Structures are given as C-alpha cells and as structure tokens.
Image (cartoon, rainbow, N blue to C red):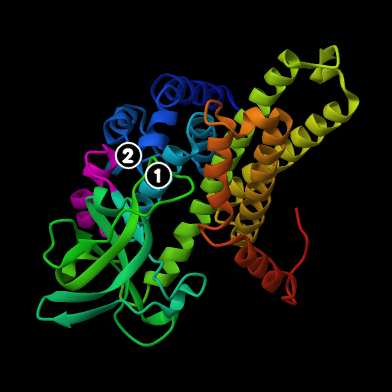
C-alpha cells in the first residue's frame, strides 16, 4: 500500500485548489447570503475538466479516476461545499449518460454538459418516495414514438436553473424493476417548477420541486433499457456518496485550519487558547477523525474505480463516516470559536450549515447503515482486504 498521492494527483489538487481559492472562496459568502447560483463562475471550471471528471476521453471527458474525483471535490469544498456539491450532481448525470447511453446519445448529450454550457439535474426523489425511492409514482406512458411523463420530483438540485433533467419514471411494474431513466429538456411543454426552497444551507445552488404534466418526450431520450433505471440510479449514487463524503472532508478541513489559526491568535486568561491542554486534545481528536474519514473515502473511491464487488458497502461506510465526522468537526470548530463562530462575519457557520445536509442526501446515513447491515448479515460476507 502506498498512501502517497502521485505527482499528477498532487498537481491536480493544487490546480483545483488554486481555482477554488481564486474563483470560489472570495464570493462564497455572498452567494450564500444572496442565494446566487454562480453558473458563469462554474463555466470557468470547464477548462479544468470539472464538467466531466471521470467521463471517457473519447466523448470529451477527462478520463480521470474516482480517487481523482474525490481529490477534486475535496479541494473545491474547502472554498464552498455547496458549489462543489452542485458540480458533483452534474458529473453524476454525465456519468450515467456515459455509462449507459448509446454512442449516438453520448455525442448528442454530453458535449454541452461537459463544457458546462448546459447544467443537469438528477430527478429521483419524490414527495412520497425519499428513502423508499423504488416506490416512486412518476409515470412514463408510451404513446406513438414518445413517452408521456406525469409526476412530481422533490428536493431537486438545479431546479429551474438546469437545462436537462434525468428523470426516473415508472414505465412498467411496481417496484424497482419497473423504473426507467429518461432525459427531459427544459423547454419541454408541461415541465414546470416549484418555488425555490428556503434552506438552511446549500444556498449557492437552486433547489425546487419539478413537475411533469403530460410532458411529451421522444423515446430516443430513454437512457439504457426500460426497467434498468433504478439500478442505474443506485450505481450513480455510489459515486455521489463518495463525492459528498469528499465535500465533507473539504469543508471540515477548512474549519480545522481556520480553527487552528484562530486558537493561536485568540487570548484568554493571559495566553493563547492553543496552550490549553483541553483545547489541544480537541484539535487532536478533530485531526484524527478527519484523517480517518479521508482514508476511508479514498479507499471507497479506489474500490469503486475497480468495480470491486464490495464497492457499494465501502461507499456507504465512507459516506456515513465522513459526513458524520465532517459535520462534527465543523460543530467543534464553532464551539471553539465561541460566540464569534455563530456570527456570519466568520465563515464557520456557513460550513456548519452546508455540511449538515450531507448526512441526509445521497441516501440518509440511516439508509447507509441499512446497506451495511444487510451486507454484514449476508452469509457470504467477510471482512477482507
């Protein structure tokens, strides 16, 4: 085992970190406060390949590994976890197209997404189908050479801002095997959006309900085969989970660094706070949790890249551990900042708000535990290396 990053990965991390420091960090507080989705800023990242990180090179992607992707999202999230997570969703949709679509569909849909000329949304969750996503009610009925889509999607990142919506809809029987994945363009008649959700965090990306009312979509917009959509959606979520874990790593790392600097400067009882042993122990625990979460996330990324049969298990573990520990680190940093950490004049509270939702989305951490438990009690399970 070699835990050192390659020279190329070190250069990649620095390049993305420099981009984030220059283009994201100075504006993140304003984007949060004014609820601005910085599409023009994100488009600058297309030159770095941020629209197609692990997409095949022959269709315009970078062809990087899942571990490279984790490093990228970790670096971006040090500046703005909300904006980094929005790019994760863009990459998740592009990956589903790259992985399951025909070559003709890839060349039709991917160029605009990879250049970030067009943005996309992943539409699985519904008002009545959250953790039980296979119970979704949105339907896609065949009529001539088209699908007629009816239903409602909830908590959709991108909302009215996106240009393309990858909709999981029921084309067949009840349950997971009756779900298909269909691309819907923004200008499709019958497609509409709810009001922007007022959220605790993630304010640099729009979130709203998406309504499909007799949306007529060509059957050529079907990705993969009918009935394959739910399986495809779950496979994409494995990648989404390690990306969100990486976003938690980046946010937690920034809070750790800011807290370390603050404790060196802040004086009480005649000395800097960094000299109090109880505070030193807190920083030691924060660093231990951060490094543990990082190693777990990096390993899950490598297993996913290798199509390891246990990849889903390790992605679930990494997501659960990194998002729980990442948020806890932000919470501890706020405590160590005292009253100042609660003020918007300081960035800690923004990271606190942004990282809280990571424990809910891409499958709640309770669902992550369920995934783990099911595998643990499978008679074929072994703890392996």
| Observer-nearest of 376 and 384 | 376
Position in image of residue 93 (x %, y %): 35, 53
Name the residue: 44% across, 74% down: 129
Residue on which disc 2 sits: 37
- As displayed, is residue 229 above or below residue 162? below
On residue 86, the disc is 1
Relative placement, left or right, of 385 versus 96 is right
Q: Quadrant of residue 78?
A: top right
- As displayed, is residue 55 above or below residue 123? above
- As displayed, is residue 255 above or below residue 300? above
Relative placement, left or right, of 308 versus 140 is right
Q: Give the range drawn in magenta.
A: 101-119
- As displayed, is residue 303 above or below residue 298? below
Q: What element carries label 1?
A: helix
Which corner quadrant holds the N terminus?
Answer: top right
| Observer-nearest of 168 and 325 | 325
Closer to the N terminus: mark 1 or mark 2?
Answer: 2
Q: Quadrant of residue 222?
A: bottom left
Q: Can residue 350 be seen in this view?
A: yes
Relative placement, left or right, of 212 versus 188 is right
């Amino acid at each position: 085992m070699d835990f050192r990053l390659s020279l190329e990965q070190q250069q990649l991390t620095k390049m993305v970190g420099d981009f984030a420091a220059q283009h994201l960090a100075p504006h993140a507080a304003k984007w949060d406060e004014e609820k601005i989705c910085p599409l023009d800023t994100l488009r600058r990242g297309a030159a770095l390949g941020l629209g197609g990180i692990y997409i095949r090179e022959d269709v315009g992607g970078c062809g990087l590994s899942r571990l490279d992707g984790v490093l990228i999202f970790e670096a971006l999230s040090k500046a703005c976890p909300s904006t980094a997570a929005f790019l994760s969703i863009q990459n998740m949709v592009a990956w589903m197209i790259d992985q399951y679509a025909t070559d003709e569909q890839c060349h039709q849909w991917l160029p605009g997404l990879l250049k970030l000329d067009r943005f996309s949304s992943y539409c699985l969750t519904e008002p009545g189908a959250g953790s039980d996503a296979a119970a979704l009610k949105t339907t896609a009925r065949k009529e001539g050479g088209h699908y007629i889509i009816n239903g409602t999607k909830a908590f959709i990142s991108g909302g009215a801002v996106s240009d393309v919506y990858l909709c999981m809809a029921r084309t067949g029987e009840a349950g997971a095997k009756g779900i298909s994945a269909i691309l819907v363009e923004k200008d499709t008649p019958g497609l509409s959006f709810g009001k922007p959700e007022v959220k605790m965090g993630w304010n640099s990306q729009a979130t709203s309900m998406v309504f499909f009312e007799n949306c007529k979509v060509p059957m050529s917009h079907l990705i993969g085969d009918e009935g394959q959509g739910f399986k495809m959606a779950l496979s994409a979520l494995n990648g989404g989970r390690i990306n969100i874990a990486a976003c938690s790593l980046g946010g937690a790392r920034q809070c750790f660094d800011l807290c370390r600097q603050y404790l060196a400067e802040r004086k009480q009882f005649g000395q800097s706070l960094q000299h109090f042993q109880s505070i030193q122990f807190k920083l030691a625990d924060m660093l231990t949790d951060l490094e543990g979460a990082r190693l777990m996330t990096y390993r899950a990324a490598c297993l996913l890249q290798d199509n390891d049969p246990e990849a889903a298990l390790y992605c679930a573990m990494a997501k659960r551990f990194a998002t729980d520990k990442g948020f806890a680190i932000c919470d501890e940093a706020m405590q160590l900042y005292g009253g100042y950490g609660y003020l918007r004049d300081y960035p800690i509270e923004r990271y606190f708000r942004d990282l809280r939702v990571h424990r809910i989305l891409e499958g709640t951490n309770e669902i992550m535990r369920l995934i783990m438990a099911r595998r643990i009690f499978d008679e074929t399970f072994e703890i392996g290396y």
